[in-house]
Amino acid sequence: MNHKIPFVDLNLQHQPIQNQLQQAIQAVLSQGDFILGKALSDFEAAFAAASGTKYGIGVASGTDAIALGLQACNIGAGDQVILPANTFVATLIGVLRAGAEPVLVDCDPQTALIDLEAAAKAITPQTKAIIPVHLYGQMVSPQKLLDLADTYKLLIFEDAAQAHLAEREGYRAGSVGIAAAFSFYPSKNLGAFGDGGMLLTRDSDVAQKMKRLRNYGASQKYFHVELGTNSRLDTLQAAVLLEKLPHLRQWNRDRLTIAQYYDAELAPLASAGIISMQNHSSNGHVYHLYVLKVEDSCLLERQQIQDKLTAVGIQTGIHYPIPCHLQPAFTDLGYKQGDFPQAEKLANQILSLPMYPGLNRNQIKEVVAAITSSLGSEPQKLLCI
Ligand SMILES: *Cc1c(COP(=O)(O)O)cnc(C)c1O
């Protein structure tokens, strides 16, 4: 289906720098260093520096950055790892692949970020690490995380797949914990022309181990010291990402501006039960997604609003419709409906609006006007509580 206002539009991002991107790709073709080539090490250094940390190790996906990254931090069998129930399944998959025991906790309904009080209650003597997921582009409070980690002697492993260059309380995503996983899936704030991921760390032991794990466990060519795999970020993808990186700050600023327009335009609908997710990190939120809640007090259900937007050519998304603990793949973990009431409620209420650099003010007005008219009336007349 062709949408008048799509959920994301990557062409707007790529067209202005198309020549540079093509030159970067051509350079790799000429060089022929497709695996672990120069553009990869250049991009690893550049992205680590931009994120305020030391080492970057490029891998095949964000999922591998989590799974191998946890292993590189020596988190595995016998260890419990705390993570939010309302994340993309890849966070949970990564923990399970590392051989650790996942312990899910609920979230804060105002931000959808992990509830750190619930996390504190879930800590046992086996708890080795906590994975804050910087969901939608907003960091989990670094100060509170560091306090928690300090009190209970936990490692912090950030899932920063949605938070490239996000900031909060003077910290940048990827620089808070022992290590952080990023994804360069095409629609992320910094996206490749295919799959890609990276682990960032300031710990040289973690970096060295990660380099081995992504390269068959080899410490040098044909000398294998542990069970690794083949998971490298292609030099071609790194060349594209290296070319895009200098634009990321501006793209993130554009996202913030768009979010601020949405906030202002949507404010009158609060009384009708349309509530935007809260930003607790002022200008440091990088708005990978702009998410609102259709509260139970609203005249319409989330599905009805989404259908009406689709009907007028506005594409939306739901991130995510089923919390991890209710996914059929993970019934073995023993969770059930009702275990994480906030995450379950959010899954039914959230709606992600179009969000991408280049989305203009008129389009934003059009999206909000379509929501308003889906409610069937002027917002002031919709005091439906
Ligand atoms: C995208 C994403 C991942 C996984 O990244 P891939 O590159 O798709 O494997 C992990 N965690 C979160 C929160 C994500 O949004």
Image (cartoon, rainbow, N blue to C red):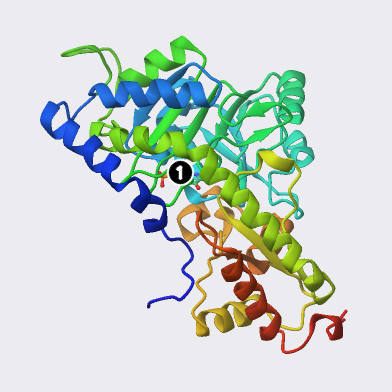
Where residue 22 appears, x then y in whole percent?
Answer: 23, 42
Given residues 111 and 74, the one toward you in this image is 111
Image location of residue 47, percent across then percent down: 45, 27
Asked which quadrant contains residue 380, the reply is bottom right
Q: Nearer the viewer, residue 302 or 372?
A: 372
Q: Which residue is mark 1?
A: 93
> In this image, 307 relative to 40: left or right?
right
Q: Residue furthest bottom?
A: 376
Quadrant in which the C terminus is drawn: bottom right
Percent from the top left, x then y, of residue 178? 56, 20
Q: Locate residue 384 relative to residue 336 in the image: left or right.
A: right
Residue 187 in sight in this render? yes
Q: Residue at x 69, y 51 (%)?
A: 112
Q: Is residue 126 above or below residue 119?
A: above
Q: Residue at x 52, y 83 (%)?
A: 312
Instruction: Please name whichever residue, 236 or 341, is drawn nearer the observer in this view of the structure.
Output: 236
Residue drawn at the location 50% of the way across and 41% of the way down = 161
Residue type at tag 1: Ile
Q: Residue 321 appears in which quarter of the rendering?
A: bottom right
